[in-house]
């Protein structure tokens, strides 16, 4: 009866959302139906969740969504073990199926992903890593469209080593500020939403700064925070690896590597900002429960919200791509 009360009955039966949340979601972010052992009442995508399954050709990859609290906890507790493992059993139905298949292009994508993740897992520091991957994916995008080079030959590492000039502030805080204040917080659910409280604390710290002051302050304090908590650097690089595993495989058809990478850096900087706000407020950054809460809420609100993702993409078009490249996608 509870389930029927939250459903719409048109051409297709759908579970209504309330302020962006499923009516069957508990305050802990878990599924009430699953907790009650009633998977038979759940739609397919929910039965598979938090597994993310996608099929290309004869291969299927299954990863986990960090928007799930348990997946986020497993991720944070195993930062050294972000990798794919071969699994012979085919006991999970793919939620996404890529209909168009080109064997060579598919193998190229897998090769590129291995190369990129190997670079992420090297000793390179995060500021230079973000810049190098930005140049790499920009070149990759242009060469794929023009088909003028074997994309496997493109180097990930930029020969001109300007690592000392790189900043943790990949985007100006003017862009991140708009994402936090316009896309992340939701005043309608402020009474039980951790991200609403985060946005208030963020605004108290950064609200009176100019963009230039905020950029300098962010870079300086992130360096200070990582020096005190070195595991955070590992966390941010592990998130990039996790994102690359999902991003490149799912970008197979759309050839949207460059744009998807830029979106990933937005998500990463927001995660870094949640840690920084906690750090500046004197909270314990070894509190796994709070880190789980921040991580799965950021993923849920930003990366897995289609309308929010479109807003951020449009903002990047206008305020980053157009400014840096002189054109829009």
Image (tube, rainbow, N blue to C red):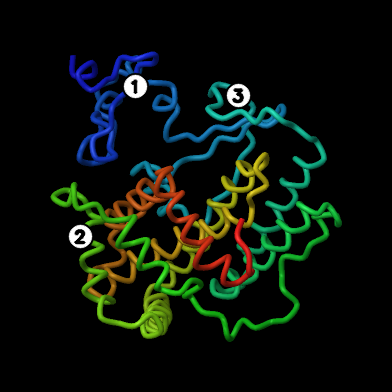
- Name the mark on residue 89: 3
Residue 235 in sight from this viewpoint: no
Tag nearer the camera, 3 or 1: 1
Q: CA gap, disc 1 to disc 2?
A: 31 Å
Q: List the residue tagged with mark 2.
A: 197
Instruction: Please provide percent x and percent y for residue 30.
Output: 28, 35
* Image quarter (top left, top right, bottom left or bottom right) of the C terminus: bottom right
Of residues 180 and 31, the one drawn nearer to the viewer in this rendering:
180
Residue 245 in sight from this viewpoint: yes
- Name the mark on residue 14: 1
- Name the mark on residue 198: none
Residue drawn at x 72%, y 46% as measured from the top left: 110
- The answer to whether mark 3 and mark 2 are in CB contact below 8 A is no
Residue drawn at x 49%, y 67% as measured from the top left: 319
Query: Neighbour class for label 2 at 10 Å: few (<14), some, many (≥20)?
Result: some
Q: Secondary structure at mark 1?
A: strand
Q: Residue furthest left?
A: 191
Residue drawn at x 83%, y 52% as measured from the top left: 147
Name the N-terminal-most of marks 3 and 2: 3
Q: On screen, 254 above or below 44? A: below
Q: Secondary structure at mark 2?
A: helix
């Amino acid at each position: 009866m509870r389930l029927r009360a939250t459903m719409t009955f048109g051409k297709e039966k759908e579970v209504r959302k309330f302020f962006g949340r499923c009516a069957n979601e508990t305050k802990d972010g878990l599924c009430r139906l699953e907790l009650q052992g009633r998977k038979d009442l759940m739609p397919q995508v929910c039965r598979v969740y938090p597994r993310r399954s996608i099929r290309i050709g004869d291969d299927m990859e299954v990863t986990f969504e960090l928007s799930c609290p348990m997946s986020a906890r497993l991720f944070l507790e195993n930062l050294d073990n972000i990798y794919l493992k071969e699994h012979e059993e085919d006991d999970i139905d793919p939620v996404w199926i890529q209909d168009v298949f080109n064997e060579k292009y598919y193998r190229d994508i897998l090769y590129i992903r291995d190369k990129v993740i190997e670079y992420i897992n090297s000793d390179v520091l995060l500021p230079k890593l973000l810049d190098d991957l930005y140049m790499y994916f920009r070149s990759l995008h242009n060469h794929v469209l023009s088909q003028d080079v074997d994309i496997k030959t493109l180097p990930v590492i930029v020969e001109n080593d300007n690592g000392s000039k790189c900043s943790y502030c990949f985007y100006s805080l003017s862009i991140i500020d708009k994402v936090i204040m316009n896309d992340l917080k939701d005043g309608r659910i402020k009474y039980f939403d951790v991200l609403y409280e985060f946005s208030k604390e963020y605004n108290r710290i950064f609200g009176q700064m100019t963009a230039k002051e905020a950029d300098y302050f962010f870079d300086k304090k992130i360096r200070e925070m990582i020096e005190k908590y070195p595991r955070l650097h590992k966390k941010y690089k592990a998130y990039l690896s996790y994102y690359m595993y999902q991003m490149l495989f799912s970008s197979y058809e759309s050839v949207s590597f460059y744009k998807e990478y830029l979106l990933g850096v937005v998500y990463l900087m927001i995660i870094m900002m949640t840690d920084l706000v906690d750090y500046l407020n004197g909270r314990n950054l070894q509190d796994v429960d709070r880190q789980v809460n921040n991580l799965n809420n950021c993923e849920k609100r930003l990366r897995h919200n289609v309308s929010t993702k479109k807003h951020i993409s449009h903002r990047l078009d206008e305020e980053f791509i157009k400014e840096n490249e002189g054109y829009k996608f």
